[in-house]
Amino acid sequence: MNNKNIRYLKGVGEKRAALFNKKGINTVEDMLYFFPRSHEDRSKTKLISECVNGETVCISGTVYAPVRENRIRRNMTIYSMIVTDSSGAITVMWYNNRFVRDVFEVGDRYTFYGKISFRGAKIEMTGPVYEKEGQGRFTEKIVPIYPLTGGLTQKIVQGTMEEAIKDAGRLDEYIPDKIREKYKIAEINYSIKNIHFPDDFESYNIARRRFVFEELMVLQLALLDRKEIFCKKDGIRLDGSCVKEFIKTLPFPLTGAQNRTIKEILQDCASGKQMNRLVQGDVGSGKTAVAAAAIYAVVKNGHQAAMMAPTEILAAQHMETLQGFFESMGITVVLLTGSLKAKEKRHALEMTATGAADVVVGTHAIIQEGVDFYDLAFVVADEQHRFGVEQRAKLSAKGVNPHMLIMSATPIPRTLALILYGDLDISIIDELPPGRKAVKTYAVGEDMRDRITKFIYKNVKLGTQVYIVCPLIEETEKSDLKNAEEISRKLAEQFTDITVGLLHGKMKPKIKDAIMTEFAEGKIDVLVSTTVIEVGVNVPNANVMIIENAERFGLSQLHQLRGRVGRGCDQAFCVLFAHGNSEITKKRMETMCISNDGFYISEQDLRLRGPGDFFGTRQHGLPEMHIANLFEDRDILKLAQEAAKEINAEGLDKYPLLKNRCGKVLMDDVVLN
Ligand code: ADP
Ligand code: MG
């Protein structure tokens, strides 16, 4: 396309170029893809006599007298002039803008776009955009409004955009014609013009649809391309028929979703290709049993498996669970974590290297240097969002293309999962084991504080454990956020016969683990903490979750937190202390109260936060969307996905221009999470 540096565009120069560069705009092509955030309809001019107080309009008229300068105090000078049209007169004025003194010729006609205000019998327009009548650059048409940074004004960007479009000339289309025809996608030259300078809003919508489609299709193609690289790797072929006998030994029948997921995993592993599968399931949906079934098959096929968790506590819990499953089957499980004593560690390493251990469960310690596997064929990474690309790669390198199973308890809408993890195959466990009661959830205000405190006490006395989660640890001056320290102190003072523990992010990992273990063992009744408990710790006896300043958390996060309770068979409760009465907060709390379905909640999260926030954290590793709104443009997303698959099936190499664009998307944005 057009790689010319924008510095050489008419009217830009080095200084402005630097400002554009700050926005990531370096070339003319970048400029063309810098889309407006909205448009202003300045296409129709009104007669002065028709103007309404408060409206923003275009008027055209003759300058009646030169600009008058009126210094009303230091730092405040008003410049004004009278403009007339066939219907009346208006005073056009600017504050402190001495440039306007030399702009207007008396008797000439200009068009002004600005806000009307009535002052007594006078009609005024303050600080308007102006140009000679009939020029049609900044007025008398639909004008794009761009997201700005310091130093750039709308006029500069609008003018530069005009130049860029002119300079670029005719652009090559890179969406294949047959795709455009099939999905009714507008051609690129038409689209570039109309996304910026549309003749009418219909043309704009047609143009926008093209770029949304393009953005999503290109992203999807880039991801598919990467997936291809994965799939081409050979993997160890495993026979999964033995898993039936394992399932029979489980103390519960599997849910339909668990069975389906196991089947999908086994199919992958039998294919002769390396598996890369993401299992998404709400907390408590039984992902561990699914992983265990797969691990069983691996071991029965004579290979080793590893399971990696983000914390020592979780690793220990997995260790216990897997040992429980495999105890009577002659399958050896070892634990490998950073806190093992030297002797234990040596032993674990030796078991791992000689193959005496069939299954190795651990933390990041597993991927450290010096850990060698005898025959690693299968790797499970739990709570996927804690692992980076590199760590996954390291883990993978411990074997010969071991199958990878990634488990996530962060449900996201399926359509989104498909883009986010376009490089992975996905299984969704969308069904909880039977008999699980939904966590009863209440959103309350400060007026309920005493009642909730009593409720906590009552539940502790009944033998239940309680979590209290606070967003911050230290009191910051300007905020009244309830902090963990204060809450735990108050509670301990008020009720001397219960044990209150405190857990926060600034503690050393060892201390955190120790406190968490005490809580898990029932030695602590109420655990006050910051969000460190977020990751899948299982304490079935904890049935009350109190969340302070719930308005500070995203919906998905609230759902994750709530998932810590309700893991046993008793009714669990969640209390959300929410402050402020913004509409969004209300809607979010309401969502939490009416639903326990992580997929529904994540969709609401996306809807209520908007895509910027959702991906702003980059926790999903997806490149920023420039134009697509992943919630509102879901329909286009589906089409773009279809199209991407079609092109991918033919081979992207057939379309070099498109391939080039796909390369750019992933160049600096690492997608693989
Ligand atoms: P998560 O998906 O959050 O990792 P777990 O694997 O920890 O969930 O399972 C949560 C609990 O549910 C465990 O105690 C587990 O034994 C139990 N469980 C798993 N599957 C079933 C099932 N099909 N029926 C009943 N209980 C189950
Ligand atoms: Mg889990």
Image: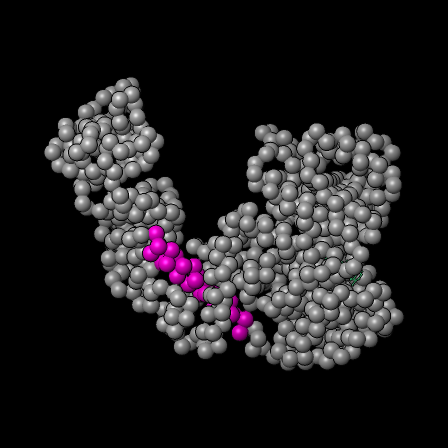
* In-image side of 657 versus 503 (left or right): left
Quarter of the image with the N terminus in it: bottom left
Quadrant position of ligand 1:
bottom right
Query: What residue is at 71 percent from the left and 55 percent from the top?
Result: 283
- The answer to which of 447 and 61 lies nearer the viewer is 61
Residue 205 belongs to the span the image colors magenta: yes
Q: Nearer the viewer, residue 574 or 181?
A: 181
Above or below, 275 relative to 97: below
Q: Is residue 97 visible?
A: no
| Residue 237 percent across, percent down from the top left | 68, 80
| Residue 406 screen position, x and y as percent | 65, 64
| Quarter holding residue 312 | bottom right
Q: Is residue 591 visible?
A: yes
Instruction: Assign the magenta stretch its main secondary structure.
Output: helix
Judging from the image, the colouring scheme is one colour
Residue 43 image point, x, y percent: 27, 45
| Residue 553 highlighted magenta (yes or no) | no
Identify the magenta region. 201-228
- Residue 99 x %, y %: 21, 33
